[in-house]
């Protein structure tokens, strides 16, 4: 048979396959989301996220040490406060849970890169991502509190802040406050394209942040829309964002691709709690091969265009990269 082009030639063995890989990634692009809570000696497993924990601050260094050993040197903090109120005061309290976690992490692991999620939903009694006016989240009033929160994180030692609230104008508001307080060099990673997603279910259980009424559809995006995601991304570029995030990851690879091709900033993708929970549950039942699925999900996200990957599987992925399974 006359056949000069044979794609299988380059798939012959592992050496060749590795040589012609189109998607490359390494551990420096991994960020691990971590939950910190009040109390002492707590390492509380999250029921819907087996293998993930809420750490009290005294237990935090052990978790961070494990990550550093695996080669994951970037974490994103999520705080679970004891006290919640209408205006989420603990989000921007000097001695709030995230602020204390940052000081502790900074002290124990000076070389670690510390990011924070900036939002109100874990701190408000109603569980919405901002302050309310009736049953509406009041955009412009919320901006002031988000800016205050971001500043307090940076003052406690955050290297980068990541607003996830989906209020309009929050990147600009945070940029202005940071700049006015001698923090011109602190980058903002914006959760620019964040969908109203059922994939956040386990996170809300973990953080006790489910809204007490209604949903988040008046601020998070409708998952029917892609062009709107681009609008959000471009707006945040104009407002001074340094990195644009798309969230969730797995069901939004087309959006990641589109954003990557349309802007010239690094693109991050967040593989969220529901993605993690699905893999864990499927593996536990013996229906899927956990390690292989983790690898395939990660590679597809990078292949779609992500430069940075936030995932609860960061430690596992670092191991797979070391083994040369992926990367
Ligand atoms: C805070 C926030 C959420 C997540 C990240 N930041 C929850 C939400 O928007 O409801 C979800 C992360 C995950 O599911 O892993 N607003």
Image: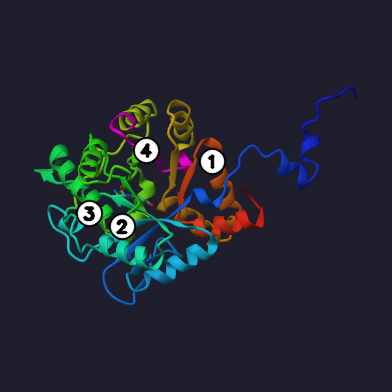
What's the CA distance linking mark 3 and mark 1? 32 Å
Of callouts 3 and 2, which one flags the residue occurring earlier in the amino acid sequence? Answer: 3
Q: Is there CB contact under 8 Å for labels 3 and 2?
A: no
User: Would residue 251 be found to the left or right of residue 85 on screen?
Assistant: right
What's the CA distance linking mark 3 and mark 2? 9 Å
The mark found on residue 70 in the picture is none
Instruction: Give the residue at mark 1.
Output: 302
Estimate how packed mark 2 is, as few (under 14), some (14 to 19) or many (20 or more) residues with alpha carbons within 10 Å.
Answer: many
Front in this rendered view, residue 147 or 276: 147
Picture residue at 51% right of the left edge, 36% below the top: 305
Is 249 magenta? The answer is yes
Q: Is residue 101 visible?
A: yes
From the viewer's perspective, is the residue at label 3 or at label 1 nearer? 3
From the viewer's perspective, is the residue at label 4 or at label 1 nearer? 4
Estimate how packed mark 1 is, as few (under 14), some (14 to 19) or many (20 or more) residues with alpha carbons within 10 Å.
Answer: many
Asked whether mark 3 lies closer than 8 Å to ligand 1, one says no
Instruction: Give the residue at mark 3.
Output: 152
What's the CA distance linking mark 2 and mark 1? 29 Å
SS for dot 1? helix
The mark found on residue 242 in the picture is 4
């Amino acid at each position: 048979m006359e056949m000069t082009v044979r794609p299988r030639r380059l798939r012959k063995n592992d050496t060749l396959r590795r040589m012609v890989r189109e998607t490359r990634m390494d551990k420096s692009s991994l960020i691990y989301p971590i939950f910190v809570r009040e109390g002492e000696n707590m390492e509380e497993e999250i029921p819907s996220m087996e293998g993930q924990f809420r750490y009290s601050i005294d237990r935090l260094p052990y978790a961070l040490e494990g990550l550093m050993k695996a080669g994951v040197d970037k974490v994103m903090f999520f705080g679970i406060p004891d006290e919640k109120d209408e205006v989420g005061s603990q989000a921007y309290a000097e001695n709030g849970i995230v602020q204390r976690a940052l000081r502790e992490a900074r002290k124990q692991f000076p070389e670690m890169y510390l990011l924070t999620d900036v939002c109100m939903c874990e701190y408000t009694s109603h569980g919405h991502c901002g302050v309310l006016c009736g049953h509406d989240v009041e955009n412009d009033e919320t901006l002031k509190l988000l800016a205050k929160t971001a500043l307090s994180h940076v003052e406690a030692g955050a290297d980068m802040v990541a607003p996830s609230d989906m209020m309009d104008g929050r990147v600009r508001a945070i940029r202005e406050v940071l700049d006015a307080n001698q923090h011109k060099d602190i980058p903002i990673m914006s959760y620019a394209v964040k969908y109203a997603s059922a994939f956040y279910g386990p996170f809300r259980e973990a953080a006790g942040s489910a809204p007490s009424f209604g949903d988040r559809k008046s601020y998070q995006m409708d998952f029917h829309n892609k062009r709107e995601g681009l609008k959000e991304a471009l707006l945040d570029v104009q407002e001074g964002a340094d990195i644009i995030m798309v969230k969730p990851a797995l069901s939004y690879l087309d959006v990641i691709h589109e954003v990557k091709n349309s802007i010239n900033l690094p693109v991050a993708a967040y593989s969220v709690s529901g993605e993690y929970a699905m893999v864990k549950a499927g593996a536990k039942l013996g229906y899927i091969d956990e390690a292989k699925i983790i690898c395939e999900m990660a590679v597809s996200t990078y292949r779609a265009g992500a430069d940075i990957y936030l995932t609860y599987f960061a430690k596992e992925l670092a191991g797979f990269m070391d083994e040369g399974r992926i990367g």
